[in-house]
Image: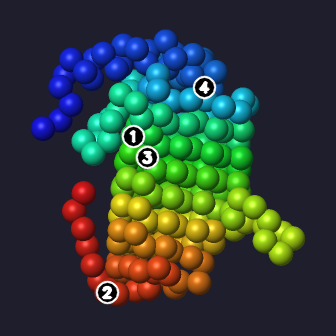
């Protein structure tokens, strides 16, 4: 059973003023007036600045941040974070559920119909690209940097995630990782740059390794 309709309407109503301000702040006026992005009133915005770009046709409510519903989490108290002094590019519709934290000092690209489940974290100091139709489960961590210096330096390395990738709950994708299209990452796995993956591979473990090839999944 999904969220009751009255709760959905209530959340959108409370989120409307902040969503209007968000669109006017980040988008050209012609796009902003179409209200393509709805941001939940529970999303905390930290560092100012940053850029948002939407590619392709614009329609109202095509991108939601902090809304949606995941039954395992308390959406009333779940607090997302929008920390974007860098750039976020939406290549089409996207759904980012409540409690998700985005920290983008570099560049984050989300393809068409990307879905990010509740309480996930994405940290892009250089660049993270997520391909179209990819689904990211709850409590997933994706980062392109160590977030601190080891041995005197942390240059960071871009992360590339292809189209129709499925990333399981509590998985971790670290700097330099590459997930080709059709990859499935099992729950609680840790993917590093050392892993060599082909399209439609299933990877699992910590550190992750390929356990099966030629797999497929249904969205």
Of discs 2 and 3, which sits in the foreground? 3
Quadrant of the rendered image containing residue 126: bottom right
Q: Quadrant of the C terminus?
A: bottom left
Residue at left offset 63%, top offset 68%: 175
Of discs 1 and 3, which sits in the foreground? 3
Secondary structure beneath dot 1 equals: strand
| Percent position of residue 155, x then y | 79, 67
The first of marks 1 and 3 along the sequence is: 1
CB of mark 2 within 8 Å of CB of mark 3? Answer: no
CB of mark 3 within 8 Å of CB of mark 4? Answer: no
Quote the CA–CA distance across marks 1 and 4.
Answer: 21 Å
Q: How is the image coloured?
A: rainbow
| Percent position of residue 84, x then y | 66, 39
Residue at the right extreme, as displayed: 152
Secondary structure beneath dot 4 equals: loop
Residue at left offset 75%, top offset 61%: 148
- Examine the rendered structure and indicate whether residue 13 appears above or below residue 195: above
The first of marks 2 and 4 along the sequence is: 4
Q: Residue 97 shows which numbered tag?
A: 1
- Examine the rendered structure and indicate whether residue 197 appears above or below residue 115: below
Can see residue 28?
A: no
Residue named by callout 3: 119
Can see residue 15?
A: yes
| Percent position of residue 184, x then y | 35, 71
CB of mark 1 within 8 Å of CB of mark 3? Answer: no
Residue at left offset 50%, top offset 81%: 207
> Neighbour class for label 4 at 10 Å: few (<14), some, many (≥20)?
some
> Neighbour class for label 1 at 10 Å: few (<14), some, many (≥20)?
many
> Neighbour class for label 3 at 10 Å: few (<14), some, many (≥20)?
many
């Amino acid at each position: 059973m999904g969220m009751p309709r009255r709760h959905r309407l209530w959340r959108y109503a409370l989120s409307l003023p902040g969503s209007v301000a968000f669109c006017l702040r980040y988008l050209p006026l012609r796009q902003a007036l179409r209200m393509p992005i709805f941001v939940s009133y529970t999303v905390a915005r930290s560092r100012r600045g940053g850029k948002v770009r939407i590619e392709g046709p614009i329609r109202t409510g095509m991108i939601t941040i902090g809304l949606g519903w995941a039954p395992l989490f308390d959406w009333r108290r779940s607090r997302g974070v929008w920390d974007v002094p860098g750039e976020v590019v939406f290549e089409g519709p996207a759904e980012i559920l409540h409690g998700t934290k985005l920290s983008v000092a570099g560049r984050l690209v989300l393809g068409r119909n990307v879905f990010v489940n509740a309480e996930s974290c994405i940290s892009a100091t250089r660049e993270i690209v997520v391909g179209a139709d990819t689904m990211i489960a709850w409590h997933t961590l994706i980062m392109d940097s160590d977030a601190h210096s080891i041995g005197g330096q942390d240059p960071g390395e871009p992360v590339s995630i292809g189209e129709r990738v499925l990333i399981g709950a509590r998985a971790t994708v670290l700097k330099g990782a590459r997930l080709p299209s059709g990859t499935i990452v099992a729950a609680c796995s840790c993917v590093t740059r050392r892993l060599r993956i082909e399209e439609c591979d299933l990877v699992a473990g910590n550190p992750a390794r390929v356990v099966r090839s030629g797999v497929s999944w249904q969205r």
